[in-house]
Amino acid sequence: MTTVTRDDLAGYLRRLGVADPGSPSVEGLYALARAHVERVPFENLDIQLGRPPGIDPALSVRRIAAGHGGYCFHLNGAFAALLEGLGYEVTRHLGGMHADPEARGAGGDHLALTVRVGGRELFVDVGMGDGPYEPLPLRGGAYEQGFAYRLEPASVTWGEGEGEDEGEGWSLRRDGVPTPRMNFRAAPAAMADFEPAHRWLSTAEGSPFRQSFVMLRRSGRGIDRLHGRMLIHTAVDGARTVRELTGAEEFYGAVTEVFGRALDDVTPEDRAALWERVTRAHEAWRAAQAAAAAAPAG
């Protein structure tokens, strides 16, 4: 791990639009988290181009300061480093994202954070893209932030077969998203604990990050999602708009204008390659939809 410098943190704060973060406080933490989810997208652009960035927090801090995003190991990893640099008490936790709302696993494919400040302990997550807009108190209960969340103590599992273990943890439940449950262990973790999952998620052909291009951004108004060539906005009142992006110019316009992802590191060759990859996946998805619609019922 390399050192996060004061200049790194200053660049990060500029990206967040925060001129003076002040001393650690609950209010300051909420403001930093809101700024992060609004300005720094969840995205896998570099993974799609076959050059996945590492999860060293110092590297992630510099990438975010330069206008890039990432997924949970980059986003929550960098945010933890920023908070620690500002004097907050941060704990990292091994988590697990699940499409099954009853799953209990916390195997390490998600990095979750808790923060102690002002005599309170809070769950903080800027690494989902479609997660909470602000931190949640680390206590069981239902929370409304435009979308509904439920945080509750849970017994979580990790490992497989005879090596499976079980222990105390927490579960975040959400509705209307591809992964409605995230579990995390109560025990603290180190960044090195996430390396195996990162290698698989960023390089394995079976990884969803290798199979599909995705960008997400949360705001007080709702969630923006770019999945392949489909641009979707889900408002906090439940209204949903969907637009198919038909050309590379429109696609990259959404990347920069809707999601705020700088493209200074993306060459013309990269742009052509990514657009071709996204279009192939989009056409395969369209073909699968058509085949499903044409299949006889029953």
Image (cartoon, rainbow, N blue to C red):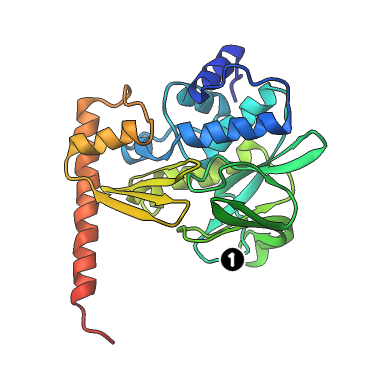
- The residue at the point 57 percent across, 46 percent down is 132
Of all residues, the one furthest to the front in this rendering is: 237
Q: Is residue 204 visible?
A: no
In this image, 108 relative to 219: left or right?
right
Residue sitting at the far top: 7
| Label 1 SS | loop
Q: Position of residue 256 (x, y in %)?
A: 32, 31
Give the residue drawn at x 49%, y 62%.
Answer: 99
Please give the count of numbered marks on the rendered protein.
1
Residue 92 falls left or right of residue 260: right
| Residue type at numbered disc 1 | Ala
Question: Where does residue 194 sit, x and y in percent of width and height?
Answer: 58, 42
* 171 relative to 19, above or below: below
Q: Is residue 239 left or right of residue 254?
A: right
Counting from the top left corner in percent of width and height, residue 36 is at 53, 32
Classify residue 117 as left or right of residue 150: right
Query: Residue 80 falls in which quadrant of the image?
Result: top right
Does 40 appear above or below 218?
above
Q: Which residue is mark 1?
A: 103
Quadrant where the C terminus sits is bottom left
**Image quadrant in which the N terminus is located:** top right
Tell me the crowding category of disc 1: few under 14, some 14 to 19, or many 20 or more residues within 10 angstroms, Cα based.
some
Task: Provide residue 218's location: percent of width, then percent of height.
Answer: 47, 42
Q: Nearer the viewer, residue 208 or 264?
A: 264
Q: Is residue 285 above or below residue 249?
A: below
